[in-house]
Image (spheres, helix red, strand yellow):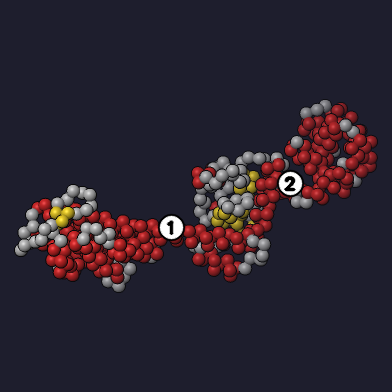
Amino acid sequence: MAFATPHNLTNGSGAGPVPAELAELLRAQLIAVADQVEAEVRREVPEYAQPPDGPYGRNLRAGVVQALTLFVDHIADPRDDGESIAATYNALGRAVAQEGRNLDVLQSAVRVGGMHAWRLMSREAETLGLDSTVVAALGELAFRTVHEVAEAAAAGFAEEQLHRSDELDRRRRQLLDLLLGKGPVVPEAVQKLAHSARWTVPRQVAVVALAGAPDQRTEDRPLALSGALVDMESRPPRMLVPDPEDSGRWAGHGFALALRGRPAAIGPTVPLAEAAQSLRWATRALGLMGRGVLPRQDVVRCADHLSTLLLHADEPLLGRLRAGALAPLDSVSAGQRARLTETLLAWLLGGSNVPDVAARLHIHPQTVRYRLRQLEKLFGDALHDPDTRLELILALRAESMHNRQD
C-alpha cells in the first residue's frame, strides 16, 4: 500500500514522520478499537466494572471514543489542538469533583485505556508495513494524547473543587453573618443554610474576636479549627467555635498556637441563638486588651474577667460613679491619693482587717492605721455604710485599672 509524502509531528520531540493517510485508516478501525479499550478498562480498573449506568460507567464509552478521536486527529493534522475533545475531558473532571469521587480512578482509566489503544494501533501500523520510525512516532503521539486528556481532566477537577470551595466559603460566611447579625436568629433559616454550607449545627458556641494585623499575609491567618466559621475580613476578625466546652478547645496551649500568636478574646459560651452576644463581649474584651485594662498579649477568656467587663459596660456611667464616690480624695496630692486608694481598696476587700491589709500591701500595720485615720477624716461615716462601700469598691477598681493604663 502506497502512502503520500509523510509529514512530521510538531510536538518538539524530534519524532519521525507519520503519514497523514494513516489517520483515515485508523479512523475506520476506531469503533472496533474503542470496544476493546472499553473492555480493557472495565477489566483493569475495578470501579469501571460496575454497571454501565453507574457514576463511572455512563461516561466511559464517550471518553474512550473522544480520546481515540483526538489521537487520530493529531495524526491527520498535528496542528490541531483538540480543543473540543479537551473540553470533554475537562467536563469529565468537573463531574468527578461534583459527585465527590476521586480523580485517581479517572486518571487510571486514561492510562490503562491509552496504553491498550496504543498496543492495538501499533499492531495495525505494523500490519500495514510501516517502519519502526513511524511506529515510534505513533508511540510518542499516543503518550502525548494520554497526557493531554489527563491534564484536561485534572484541570476540570481542580477548577470545580476551587469553585465548590469558594461557594462553600461563601455560604459559611453567609451563615456566620446570619448568626452574628442584629436580627433574631430563626432556627429554620439556620438549619437550611447550615445544610447547604455542610456545617453541623451545635448546641452552644463561643465567638472569638481576634486582633487585627497590618496586612493579611496567609502565613499569619489562624490555623483552621474543626467546624469553626471564620471571617478574617470583618473588623475585628472573628471566629465562631462550635461546642467549645465539650471539645476542650481552650485546654492547654493548642488554641493559642492555632492563632499563631495573634492576641484574641474568647467570648462567653452561649446557646447558638445568642452568638451575637458572645461576639459583643469578645469585642469589648479585645478593646480592653488594647487599652491595657486586660492583658495585652495572649488569649483572654471573657469568662475569667466578667466583673471587669461588667464594670466597663457603660464607661461614661463608670466615670460618673468614680468621680462621685472618690470626690473626698480630690483634696489630696496625687501621691497621697495613690497610697490612700490602694489602702482603702485592700481594707474594703479584706473585711476591714488591718493585719491582712498590711500583709497584702507589704507595709507595717501602723502605716495602715495611719492611712485609715486619714481616710476616716475624708469620708467620715460613709466608710461604714454598706451601699457606699460597694460603690467605693467599684470606683476603686476602676481607679486601679485606670492607673495601670497610664
- Contact, CB < 8 Å: mark 2 with mark 1? no
* Separation (CA) of disc 2 from disc 1: 45 Å
- In the picture, the quarter occupied by the C terminus is top right
Identified at 44% across, 60% down, the residue is 163
In front here: 10 or 266?
A: 10
In front here: 297 or 390?
A: 297
Amino acid type, label 2: Thr
Residue 242 image position (x, y, % from top left):
56, 56
Identified at 67% across, 50% down, the residue is 283
Mark 1 — residue?
A: 162
Count neighbours of disc 1 (C-alpha within 10 A) and say few if under 14, some if 14 to 19, many if 20 or more.
few
Residue 384 image position (x, y, % from top left):
90, 43
Count neighbours of disc 2 (C-alpha within 10 A) and say few if under 14, some if 14 to 19, many if 20 or more.
some
Mark 2 — residue?
A: 308
Count of residue discs: 2
Indicate the secondary structure of the residue bearing disc 2: helix
Q: Residue 26's quadrant in the figure?
A: bottom left
